[in-house]
């Protein structure tokens, strides 16, 4: 009999099992995939750490979380500075003085501010009724047309005029020549990839891969005193209130016989004609010097039950539905729910770690 059955060998399950085994508990970790790590899984191909489920850049403002991770890995000095390609024109992201110079030839912050202010005024949006109006009212027409419209429409599979304004609450605009995407104090890529971190976290647990919890829920739960579930919460409750929606992604990975395909780890394609939203060139995350390269094109896709769930849709229907599941989950005896799928929430890695550590603290608060 194990102390814990952990459903999901992703980051949440791995942090929980590390902390539980450290406290002398036994854990059985199962995952339906044939590898550990969940969505942060990296796989070595041609000497390059390939991010199999999309680009993963570690960043946090929390010194506690940053220090916590140092016991499992060192981080390199990678700074995320994506490039936008709009019909062959290249712009720096996030929107900053470099972008404004590339768009309008302006050189000072005052000139850039005036340009944006006059475009906003010209558009004359009083109260934004949709995403298009919201974006224009925040950053003006040029940035919207070239850098937001096509990308966002591909991402959501709908016209910007049919998308609700609330999706964009604010758009970070920076009046310095600073291409660093994140404002966080700490960021980097793990020197030996993410999978190596998860391996260490799971070292003292029993791990079974290629095992779906729902194939025999009762059998698995009987093997432990308590269960931590990190899969989809609606599936756990047999979709009794309905299905929670997601947006999905399809990845196309290619190997190229060049040492440098696009000169940057992340290039966003912001026009509407290119079917993918971005191309990742994995070696640049680790400043790789290999003679060949591996790239991944990321295509947003519709999601249907059974597809890989990536982004929760936090609209009214789904939020209300999730709250119903959450209410019954809180009454489930000896079962804990955690991670992005069980809480129906987009979580960055540092947030998942913080949340797993909180769950552990609560769980062990009654022990000394
Ligand atoms: P995760 O999904 O990783 O793990 C859950 C595990 O449970 C999976 O392995 C799954 O197979 C398993 N499972 C589910 N149902 C099961 C069942 N029935 N039986 C057995 N196993 C089951 N964050 C960040 O900080 N920086 C970044 O750059 C990015 N980039 C990024 C890009 C993209 C495209 C996405 C979608 C997400 C990011 N993220 C990110 C977020 C990051 O991926 C996320 O924080 C973690 O992967 C969440 O870890 P979890 O353990 O919660 O879920």
Image: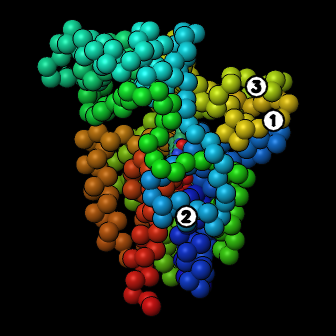
Place of residue 231 in the rendered image (x, y in percent of width and height, measured from the top left): 49, 57
**291 over 12 or under it: above or below:** above
Place of residue 181 in the rendered image (x, y in percent of width and height, measured from the top left): 49, 35
In front of the other: 163 or 77:
77
Return the disc, 1 or 3, that comes first in the chain's sequence: 3
The quadrant where residue 136 appears: top left
Return the disc, 2 or 3, that comes first in the chain's sequence: 2
Dot 1: few (<14), some (14–19), or many (≥20) neighbours within 10 Å? few
Asked if the beta carbon under badge 2 is closer than 8 A to the nearest atom of ligand 1, the reply is: no
Give the SS element for disc 3.
loop
Residue for badge 2: 67
At a point 42% along the width and 47% down the height, the residue shown is 346
In front of the other: 89 or 8:
89
Residue for badge 3: 260
At a point 53% along the width and 59% down the height, the residue shown is 66
Q: How is the image coloured?
A: rainbow
Question: What number is the disc on residue 289?
Answer: 1
The quadrant where residue 24 appears: bottom right
In the rendered image, the quadrant that contains the N terminus is: bottom right
Return the disc, 2 or 1, that comes first in the chain's sequence: 2
**110 over 247 or under it: above or below:** above
Whether residue 50 sits left or right of residue 124 in the image: it is: right
Whether residue 225 sits left or right of residue 115 in the image: it is: right
CA separation, marks 2 and 1?
29 Å
At a point 57% along the width and 72% down the height, the residue shown is 17
């Amino acid at each position: 009999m194990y102390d814990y059955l952990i459903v999901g060998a992703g980051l949440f399950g791995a942090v929980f099992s590390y902390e539980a085994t450290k406290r002398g508990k036994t854990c059985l970790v199962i995952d339906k995939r044939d590898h550990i790590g969940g969505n942060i899984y990296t796989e070595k191909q041609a000497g390059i750490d390939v991010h199999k489920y999309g680009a993963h850049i570690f960043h946090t403002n929390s010194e506690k979380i940053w220090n916590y991770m140092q016991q499992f890995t060192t981080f390199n000095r990678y700074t995320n500075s994506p490039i936008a390609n709009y019909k062959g024109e290249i712009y720096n992201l996030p929107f900053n003085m470099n972008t404004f110079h590339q768009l309008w030839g302006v050189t000072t912050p005052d000139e850039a501010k005036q340009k944006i202010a006059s475009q906003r005024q010209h558009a004359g949006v009083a109260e934004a009724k949709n995403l298009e109006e919201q974006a224009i009212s925040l950053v003006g027409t040029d940035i919207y047309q070239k850098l937001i419209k096509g990308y966002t429409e591909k991402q959501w599979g709908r016209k910007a005029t049919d998308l609700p304004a609330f999706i964009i609450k604010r758009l970070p605009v920076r009046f310095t020549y600073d291409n660093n995407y994140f404002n966080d104090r700490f960021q980097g890529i793990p020197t030996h990839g993410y999978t190596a971190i998860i391996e260490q976290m799971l070292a003292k647990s029993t791990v079974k891969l290629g095992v779906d919890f729902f194939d025999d829920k009762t059998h698995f739960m009987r093997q432990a005193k308590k269960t931590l579930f990190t899969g989809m919460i609606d599936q756990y409750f047999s979709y009794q209130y309905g299905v929670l929606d997601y947006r999905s992604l399809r990845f196309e990975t290619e190997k190229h016989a060049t040492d440098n395909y696009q000169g940057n780890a992340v290039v966003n394609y912001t026009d509407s004609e290119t079917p993918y939203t971005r191309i990742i060139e994995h070696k640049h995350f680790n400043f790789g010097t290999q003679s060949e390269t591996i790239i991944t094109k990321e295509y947003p896709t519709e999601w249907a039950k059974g597809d890989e769930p990536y982004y929760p849709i936090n609209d009214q229907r789904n939020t209300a539905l999730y709250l119903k599941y959450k209410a019954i989950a809180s009454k489930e005896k000896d079962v804990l729910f955690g991670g992005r799928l069980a809480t129906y929430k987009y979580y960055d890695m540092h947030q998942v770690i913080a949340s797993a550590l909180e769950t552990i603290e609560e769980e062990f608060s009654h022990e000394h």
